[in-house]
Every structure is written in structure tokens, then in C-alpha cells.
Image (cartoon, rainbow, N blue to C red):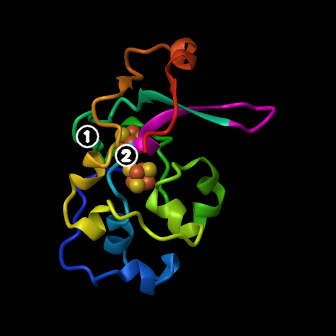
Amino acid sequence: MTNQIDRADLTPRFWEKKPLQKMSPREWEALCDGCGKCCLNKLEDDDTGEVALTRVACRLLDDQSCQCAHYENRHSFIPECIVLKPENLDTHAYWMPRTCAYRLLWDGKALPEWHPLLTGDPDSVHRAGVSVRGMTVSEFVTPLEEWEDYIIDEPG
Ligand code: SF4
Ligand code: SF4
């Protein structure tokens, strides 16, 4: 979900006034805090449904910017990358990071004070220690059978 996020000239605190379903595409995209956590691979237990987060990142994630290297045409490389929308949030909210703005708003919660929409600074997510900056290994060089060795607690 991470791209170059344009947060300029949006209505102040629009997310407190509009339901997710009524947001414009720009408002929707601006909700993303740029943490990169949804671009980490998860391991889901088929029996219990438990989801474990790993620090094995999608091959397109830039470990420093925490952004997708090819956001607009990412599906040419990663067809399974999810396009999050108001209509499918109900099926995805359960595995999304606890701090993810989409999950927070879906759950009726407020955005955290470090969110770039509140600070006006895209780096505030990194300073708050919530992003994956500098902590990932690429799935490109990490075989699936080793992913269990990379299970982590969610940053932040
Ligand atoms: S977890 Fe949520 S806020 Fe973080 S990059 Fe993904 S979509 Fe954006
Ligand atoms: S293609 Fe990979 S890096 Fe890009 S948004 Fe999807 S999961 Fe994240």
C-alpha cells in the first residue's frame, strides 16, 4: 500500500468528518502512514487462523523509504498485492497492522499523534519507531522455509 503519498491541500482532519466509503481517492491514499508493515510477509496458521508477522519483505519494498518501488504497476510484478478499498476492508482488517490507519478507522479509533496527516511530516512515522525502515530482509533472497526464523513483534 505504500507509494509517494500526496497529502497536500486536503481538508483538515477529513477522516474525522467523512466515512471511509465517502472519501476521494486522494483522501483514501493519504490515510496510509507509509509504515510499510503491510508489505511484510505473514505466516498464517491454517488451523488456528493466527497470523505471525515476519520481517521478510515483499521484493518491491524499499527498506529505507518503506515505499513500493513500482506502486502504480506493481501488479505486473506482484499480481497478488492487495488493492485495499472500503468494500474489502472487512475481509482484510484482521491481519492488518494494529497501527494501520485503515484498520484504526475501520475499528472506529483515532489516528495516532505521529501520523503524517497530523504532524505534516512524512518522516514522523519513522521517528516514532513504527515503520519497517532498516529492519527487513527481502523475500528475494530468503527461502520460504526460513521465514519462521524471521518472525517479529509488530514495530510500534
Ligand atoms: S500498514 Fe497501513 S498505514 Fe502502513 S503502509 Fe500499509 S496501508 Fe499504509
Ligand atoms: S507490491 Fe509489494 S511493496 Fe508494493 S505495495 Fe504490494 S506488497 Fe507492498
What is the CA distance from the residue labelled 1 to the residue labelled 2? 20 Å
Observer-nearest residue: 111 or 10?
111
The answer to whether residue 145 of the structure is visible from this angle is yes
Q: Are marks 1 and 2 in contact (CB under 8 Å)?
A: no
The spot of residue 124 in percent (x, y) is: 25, 54
| Cβ of mark 1 under 8 A from ligand 2 | yes
Magenta span of residues: 37-50
Q: Residue at x 37, y 44 (%)?
A: 36
Other residues around mark 2 within 10 Å, as few (<14) / some (14–19) / many (≥20): many
Amino acid at pointer 2: Val
Quarter of the rendering containing residue 42: top right
SS class, disc 2: loop
The spot of residue 50 in percent (x, y) is: 70, 37
Q: Which label belongs to residue 69?
A: 1
Residue bearing mark 2: 130
The spot of residue 97 in percent (x, y) is: 51, 48
